[in-house]
Amino acid sequence: MSTETPSSPTLDDGRRLLAAAEALFEPVLARARELTAGGRAIDDHQVLAERVAYAATEVRAARETLARASAAGEEGRGGALLETTAAAAVADLVASVRARLDPELDALGLGDAALEKAFAPELRALLRRAGSEAVLREIGRETIEQRGRNELPLDEMLEQVRESVREFADKEVAPQAEHIHRRDEDIPEEFIRKMSELGYFGLSIPEEYGGHEMGNLAMILTTEELSRASLAAAGSLITRPEILTKALLQGGTEAQKKTWLPKLASGEVMVGVSVTEPDIGSDVAGVKCRATRATVEGEPGWVINGPKAWCTFAGRADVLALLARTDPDPAKGAKGLSLFIVPKDAFEGHDFEMKQPGGGRMVGKADATPGYRGMHSFTLNLEDYFVPASHLVGGEDGLGKGFYLQMGGFAAGRLQTGGRACGLAQAALEKTAEYVVDRAQFGKPISEYQLTRYNLGLMATRLLAARALTYAAAEAMDRDERKAGPLAAQAKLLSCDIAVDVTQRGQLMHGGWGYAEEYPISRYVVDAQVLPIFEGVKPILELKVIARTLLAS
Ligand SMILES: Cc1cc2nc3c(=O)[nH]c(=O)nc-3n(C[C@H](O)[C@H](O)[C@H](O)COP(=O)(O)OP(=O)(O)OC[C@H]3O[C@@H](n4cnc5c(N)ncnc54)[C@H](O)[C@@H]3O)c2cc1C
């Protein structure tokens, strides 16, 4: 940090602010637990539960931001800009927690006293100073000077992963990203082939099943760098196989793991995930698509009937991980669902029809979308579509366990989406930092205006928090996949909102050109908007995953 800002906040300042936010959050959480009967009555207090879930996410992000910056400092890889940005990020998060919880304090019987106790006058002054516009302008000035480049310190192996993926994405993906988006074209096969050769699909798959087992953080860095070049044409390719991988690792038979995981790791098999139906979205337990036992042409298995919606990549995919109702009794809810690996041919384009020799049929038609193009998201209809018995995940033991396996897969998907959001926000930060230097109005580059610097500072600061939380979730996933689900959901929640915020701020700083398709920022904005929608639309993620876990514990 330059000496222009005498009062640059320190990590110690950040720690004091975090302690204040925790001091406010803890009694709120305790009262919210009582009020919602340990989370059982969330629906009677949805707004409170949503606020608590978000505040918890922000508190956790503040903690992880400090931890990452402290660790980098201790290892001698930090730096003044990282320290100031981390402290400012904590101030931004803590101010948000305070404002978010304030409206609930009276209803929770805590009142102003809780606020005053947590935020004594000197802490309020510190909060204003650490998150002041002067601090953010200075961060913005340095961010512009560095053209927004992401140099967050990592260990040597991870830095190599990041560098090599960045090089690949800049060289191979970025030059084609605009074209694919504007023409809504298919993802080029050469992307898939090269990513397969580079081992990108096997990063988190155990070695015994043909993967590289480099861990979730290496995978997230890969996804992040690919998404920086294009969310839709490369950054989202690992997400689907990752969802199926986690479902197989948790509940697949040994034979299924041996059959499918090496093919997923090598990129030989591309995956679509088919859960949503035209009238079933968030209420996954209500899935209606039916799978019925049948023997077709002498082979025992299942026939699947029903519509599915929003199945991304269903055309090109070689298999669909499809959730279907195997128990016809609707009262069974989630317990009547099973997960199938549904094989199909790979098709080009925006619609397809797959006919099986035994009479089964699957048709797909892509729904046009403003962004997230390239993979195409399909409405499907399956008619007596045959799937061999060996494709029921978990075999006979997997009957009725599809919902839980799918949710396990979604935890991995959400972690992935945290990485995708960070990559997309990073792209917006870099393009904006370049643009504001090149664009002059009223006789000087717009980068020299205070408000531009402030906005760039805020973008960089928020992105650091999103990244710290996402990386923490990746590391938690390495330690214990089953316990990391709620943290992955928090990483997804915050990072996706930050991607929306950062891309829109970037667009405004491009003025009218930010709305022109030939400027990538316009693509980033429409791509970012889908992030809070899938893998648990934001309100559902907050209420049914994060709040439920928090309020129950
Ligand atoms: C581009 C794109 C790609 C997608 N890809 C896939 C894919 O590959 N595979 C797949 O299976 N799905 C996919 N989806 C579907 C996505 O996961 C769903 O859209 C998402 O889960 C939300 O479901 P829904 O759209 O039916 O919304 P709904 O469930 O109808 O929810 C709409 C809104 O209703 C409100 N709401 C609903 N229930 C509650 C409640 N209990 N309490 C309070 N408010 C509530 C919330 O405000 C919510 O945002 C994709 C979607 C898009 C847009």
Image (tube, rainbow, N blue to C red):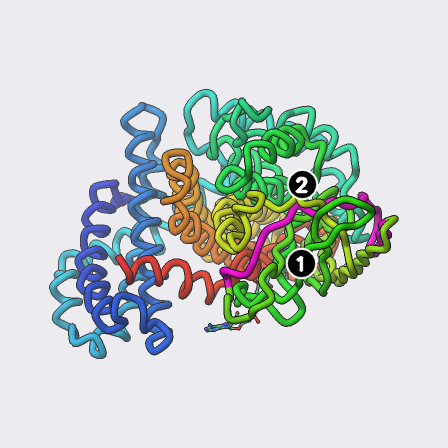
Q: Magenta stretch: residue 350 in it?
A: yes
**Residue at horizontal 78 percent and vertical 32 percent from the top:** 190
Task: Give the residues drawn in magenta, as a range.
Answer: 334-356
Image quadrant in which you'd find residue 23:
bottom left
Secondary element type, mark 1: strand
Q: Badge 2 is on which residue?
A: 234
Ligand 1 is within 8 Å of the C-beta of the residue at disc 2: no
**Residue at horizontal 61 percent and vertical 61 percent from the top:** 325
Q: Earlier in the sequence, mark 2 or mark 1?
A: 2
Side of 321 where 552 appears, left or right = left
Residue toward you, 190 or 446: 190
Residue 176 percent location from the top left of the image: 76, 40
Secondary element type, mark 2: helix
Residue 20 seen in the current view: yes
Residue 354 percent location from the top left of the image: 84, 52
Q: Badge 1 is on which residue?
A: 291
